[in-house]
Amino acid sequence: MMGDVPKLPAPQLTRKVAVDLSDKELQVFPAVATVVVSGTVDRFGYMRNLAVARSGGALLDKRSLEAVSQYRFAPATEDNRPADLPVFITITIKK
């Protein structure tokens, strides 16, 4: 059917980095805060084109982007070859 987009297997997270916040910084946020980061996992497993899709506040956004930029993945594959794939990553910060 025309216009159908083939579904690629999702990239698999191989390295996750925690959001770095001091105890003092955590005190100014609610008990639970969420940031959604959008980007592309490239064919080498690196995050590219990062942007905040849902803000948790300027500091949380900045620290979340810093953490996600260090994530590593086994990339998605198409026809058994690594492929770029857009993703959304939800980060939840709890006190």
Image: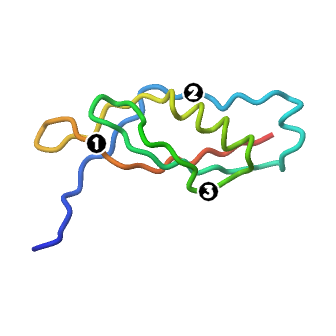
Figure quadrant of the N terminus:
bottom left
Secondary element type, mark 2: loop
Secondary element type, mark 3: strand
| Residue 79, quarter of picture | top left
Which residue: 23% across, 40% down? 83
Q: Could you say which is closer to the camera, residue 76 or residue 66?
A: 66
Residue under label 1, please give it.
84
Secondary element type, mark 1: loop
Which residue: 84% across, 50% down? 30
The way the protein has been coloured in the rendering is rainbow
Precedes in sequence: disc 3 or disc 2: 2
Q: How many marks?
A: 3
Between disc 3 and disc 2, the foreground one is: 3
Number of other residues with Cα within 10 Å of mark 1, as a class: few under 14, some 14 to 19, many 20 or more = many
In the picture provided, is 61 more to the left or to the right than 72?
A: right
Where does the image place residue 77, in percent across and percent down from the top left? 21, 40
Precedes in sequence: disc 1 or disc 2: 2
Which residue: 24% across, 50% down? 8
**CA separation in Å, label 3 and label 1:** 22 Å
Where does the image place residue 28, in percent across and percent down from the top left? 88, 43
Residue 19: mark = none
Residue under label 3, please give it.
54
**CA separation in Å, label 3 and label 2:** 19 Å
Looking at the picture, does residue 45 appear above or below residue 8?
Answer: above
Looking at the picture, does residue 72 appear above or below residue 77?
Answer: above
Q: Amino acid at mark 3?
A: Arg
Where does the image place residue 68, in percent across and percent down from the top left? 53, 35
Q: Amino acid at mark 1?
A: Asp
Between disc 1 and disc 2, the foreground one is: 1
Where does the image place residue 41, in percent across and percent down from the top left? 36, 39
